[in-house]
Image (cartoon, grey):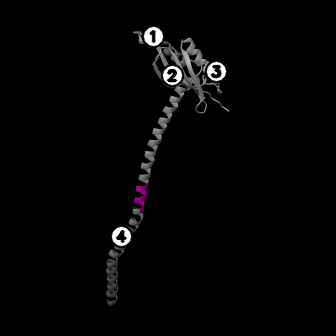
């Protein structure tokens, strides 16, 4: 009997030991799990936050890129619309400087519009540009026609400066200002391609 009671006693001690160790093992296991969770979740949360920030930056870059792309497409479409005009203008620009030919055109346009050339100076101002400083006298309607003819000339000209005043030599009194003789000074630019 004592033998049995010793076995039962040992069994009870073992059971009590297991009862006492059970919460300790559970506590240690729980602590280790919490520790592992903290060690793995905190860096993971940081990585997730970093990824979110990167995604937001990529999204904003994508929006900027889309805006640039739209602007580029608009510019390309606008350039396509301009191409016929550019070709037309470049067909009116000679390949090398020719001041005499440019002046002859300007002088001819002035003469057919009854304008009198008083002064002419010419110089090459910028690269591939010739500049003509011209002083004329004539009536307003003739000056108006002169500008219209320059605009449709087969040579491309642009007017960078224009001064018009009533000619001091004109003593006639006339009620119609359009028929009074005027003095005008203009600077006309002419280009050449000079592709060498």
Q: Secondary structure at mark 4?
A: helix
Task: Give residue 22's quadrant in the image.
Answer: bottom left
Residue at which label 1 appears = 179
Residue 32, quarter of picture: bottom left
Q: Residue furthest right?
A: 196
| Label drawn at residue 91 | none
How far, Cα to Cα, is label 4 from label 1? 108 Å
The picture places residue 13, in percent across and down from the top left corner, at 33, 83
Quadrant (top left, top right, bottom left, bottom right) of the C terminus: top right
Up the image or down, 50 lies above or below 31; here it is above
Q: Which residue is mark 4?
A: 30
Q: Please tell me whether mark 3 or mark 2 is closer to you in this view.
A: 2
- Look at mark 2 in the image and give the residue it sits on: 185
Q: Which residue is mark 3?
A: 101
In what element is the residue under mark 2?
A: strand
Compared with residue 149, is residue 28 higher up or lower down, i.e. above or below?
below
Label 3 CA crowd tier, 10 Å (few <14, some 14–19, many 20+): few
Magenta-span inclusion, residue 134: no
The mark closer to the camera, 4 or 1, is 1
Look at discs 1 and 3 and give the one toward the viewer: 1
Q: Are marks 2 and 4 in contact (CB under 8 Å)?
A: no
Segment tinted magenta in the rendering: 43-50
Distance, label 3 to label 4, CA atoms, is: 99 Å
Sequence-first disc among 1 and 2: 1
Disc nearer the start of the sequence (2/4): 4
CB under 8 Å between callouts 1 and 2? Answer: no
* Category of crowding for the residue at label 1, using alpha-carbon neighbours closer than 10 angstroms: few (below 14), some (14–19), many (at least 20): few
Which mark is nearer the camera, 2 or 4?
Answer: 2
Give the spatial CA distance, label 1 vs label 3: 31 Å
Q: Earlier in the sequence, mark 3 or mark 4?
A: 4
- Cα distance, mark 2 to mark 4? 98 Å
Q: Earlier in the sequence, mark 1 or mark 3?
A: 3
């Amino acid at each position: 009997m004592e033998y049995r009671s010793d076995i039962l006693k040992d069994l009870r001690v073992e059971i009590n030991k297991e009862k006492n160790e059970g919460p300790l093992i559970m506590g240690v296991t729980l602590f280790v799990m919490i520790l592992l969770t903290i060690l793995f979740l905190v860096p993971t949360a940081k990585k997730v936050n970093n990824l979110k920030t990167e995604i937001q930056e990529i999204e904003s870059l994508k929006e900027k890129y889309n805006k640039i792309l739209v602007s580029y497409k608009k510019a390309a479409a606008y350039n396509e619309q301009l191409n016929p005009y550019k070709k037309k203008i470049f067909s009116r620009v000679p390949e090398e400087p020719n001041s005499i030919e440019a002046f002859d055109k300007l002088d001819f346009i002035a003469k057919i519009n009854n304008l009198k050339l008083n002064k002419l100076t010419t110089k090459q101002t910028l690269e591939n540009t010739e500049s003509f400083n011209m002083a004329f006298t004539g009536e307003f309607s003739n000056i108006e026609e002169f500008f219209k003819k320059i605009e449709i000339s087969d040579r491309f000209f642009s007017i960078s400066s224009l001064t018009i005043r009533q000619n001091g030599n004109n003593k006639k009194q006339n009620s119609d200002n359009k028929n009074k003789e005027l003095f005008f000074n203009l600077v006309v630019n002419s280009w050449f391609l000079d592709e060498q």
